[in-house]
Amino acid sequence: MRKQFIINVSIGLLVLEVQDRILEFLVAICESIISGALPAESAKSVDQKEQPKPAIPSDKADSYLSTLELARERPYLPPRMDVGRLRSIAESYLNGWKNHAWEMRENPAYFQRVYLDWADHAYEQVVDVYEKSQMTEAAWNRAALFACYEITAQYFTWNLITQLLRKVERFYNDSECA
């Protein structure tokens, strides 16, 4: 025996009204797309006139420039690039990863917390239909590998960024002195 899907008449009318509005919207969108694809003469109606573009306000009589004119002439540039601040931010990240590596080495409880955090996010932790996880020895080894790999990768990345910013800072300071 098949069950039939029955809709109340008032709900059916509401559904039809919503569908009608959606259809009107889609037709209007399609017409606007098609009118943009047609040649300019056929797309414009007789009563529709092309309006001129508004003139950009400019007041050359005043000795002071307006902010609009200043923005049009040149974009904002800081007077000096603060490479030292960028370098100090990169060094703080580098020091954070150094401290993280040192804590992993010296503090077994910290190592365990990081290790278990990586293990908790392993895809083998997803339980099966019998509500058992599939954590194998290989999965535990992979969690330890990822925990150590993250430290190494982040440390070397921030070390490289710091070295490059030191070079940029030296170059920037030398070019200012010249």
Image (cartoon, helix red, strand yellow):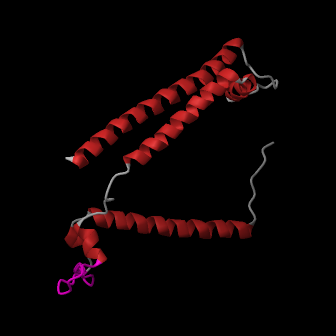
Looking at the image, residue 103 sits to the left or right of residue 31; the answer is: right
Q: Is residue 29 above or below residue 176?
A: below
The residue sitting at 25% across, 49% down in the picture is 176
Camera-side residue of 16 and 157: 157
Q: Residue furthest bottom?
A: 61
Q: Is residue 135 above or below residue 82?
A: above
Q: Where is residue 40, by image quadrant?
A: bottom left
Camera-side residue of 167 and 23: 167
Camera-side residue of 92 and 24: 92
Residue 16 visible in the snapshot: yes
Residue 11 highlighted magenta (yes or no): no
The residue sitting at 25% across, 69% down in the picture is 72
- Residue 103: x, y in percent? 66, 27
Q: Residue furthest top?
A: 137
Q: Is residue 6 above or below residue 126?
A: below
The residue sitting at 31% across, 59% down in the picture is 79
- Residue 37: x, y in percent? 28, 62
Residue 43 visible in the snapshot: no
Looking at the image, residue 132 sits to the left or right of residue 157; the answer is: right
Q: Where is residue 134, by image quadrant?
A: top right
Majority secondary structure of magenta residues: loop
Q: Is residue 27 above or below residue 103?
A: below
Looking at the image, residue 107 sits to the left or right of residue 40; the answer is: right
Q: Which residues are magenta?
A: 46-66
- Residue 64: x, y in percent? 24, 81
